[in-house]
Amino acid sequence: MNLAAPSIFEPPLGADDRPPRPAPLRALVLAAGRGERLRPLTDTLPKPLVSVRGRPLIEWHLLALARSGVREVVINVAWLGQRLVDALGDGERFGLRLHWSREDLDFGHALETAGGIARALPWLADGPDDAFWVVSGDVLVPDFDFCAARARQFADAQPELDALLWLVPNPPWHAAGDFGIDAQGLGLSEGCGPDGARWTYANLALVRARLVRELSPGVRAPLGPLLHAAMRRRAVGVERWTGEWHNVGTASDLAAAEQAA
C-alpha cells in the first residue's frame, strides 16, 4: 500500500474532481382541498389563493421554499384546480419549477393527504428512501425556514425515520392535540411525553416515500393513520415550532392571521 503523501507538484483538486453537491430536496404543497369552512369565499376561489397580508397563502410557501434552495415543487389540485395553474404557472417568477398533480382531471376528486402524496411520488422521489418536504397550502407560517441543512440531515443521517413533523402548541379549537413527544424527540401516537403535553401537527413535515408505499396511486387516504402506525414503530421524529402559525380554516382564522401582522 502506498502511504506516501501526494507530491506538492501535483495539480490541486479541481472543481470537476470534487464530489458533487447533493441536490436540494423537492417539495409538495397540498392544495386540493375544497375549503368548506371558508365558504362562500372558496366557492369561486381555491383556498390556497386566499390573500393574507397582501399575498396568496400558497405564495408564502413558494417564496420560502425558493429562499431555502428548493427548486422542484409539486402542487396537487382538485377544487378549482385550473385557477391555481393559471395563477402560478410554471413557477419561474418564484425561481421554481412547478409540477402539477391534477387530481381533478385524473380522478375527479381530491385524494386526501396521503393519497395526494402517493399520487405525486413520481415527481418527488426516485426511490423509497428519498425524502421531500410536505406542507399544506392553507397554513400561514411566515417565519418558517425550510432549512436545507436540516432537510439534508434528515435525508442522510436519520435513515430510521419515515417522517419528521413540526408540532405547535394546541390552538383553542384543537385543545386535545394530535401527538405527544417522548424523551428522545420521537412522536407518540398515544399519551404525553415528559413535558406532560400533547401537541398539534403544524402541517409541515419532511417525509420519506416509503411512508406511503402501500398506497396505490389514485386511492383516497388520510395521512393520520400512517403517522400513528409509524409512531408505534418509533419511526417519526418531531420538532416544536413556537413561532407564528395560523391554520386558515374559517373566516375568523383568516381575520386572526391578518390582525397578527
Image (cartoon, rainbow, N blue to C red):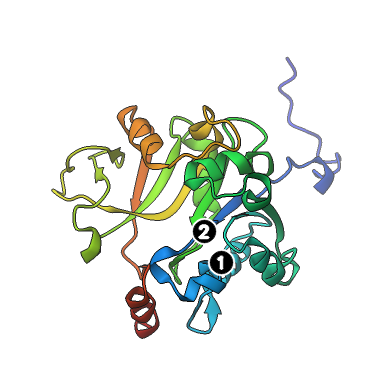
Q: Whole-percent x and y of residue 62? A: 60, 65
Tell me the kind of residue under disc 1.
Ala
> Along the polypeptide, which appears first: circle 2 or circle 1?
1
Image quadrant in which the C terminus is located: bottom left
* Relative to 168, residue 25 above or below: above
Dot 1 crowding, Cα within 10 Å, few <14, some 14–19, many 20+: some
In the rendered image, which quarter is residue 69 located in?
bottom right
- Do the numbered discs 2 and 1 sit on residues whose CB atoms are within 8 Å? yes
Q: On the image, numbered disc 2 is attached to which residue?
A: 146
Image quadrant in which the N terminus is located: top right
In this rendering, position of residue 9 left or right of residue 194? right
- In front here: 19 or 169? 169
Determine the residue located farthest toward the left in the rendered image: 196
- In front here: 134 or 137? 137
Q: On the image, numbered disc 1 is attached to which residue?
A: 64
Secondary structure category for the residue under label 2 = loop
Dot 2 crowding, Cα within 10 Å, few <14, some 14–19, many 20+: many
* Relative to 37, residue 202 above or below: above
Say which residue appears at 64% left-offset and 66% top-offset.
84
Say which residue appears at 55% left-offset and 56% top-offset.
32
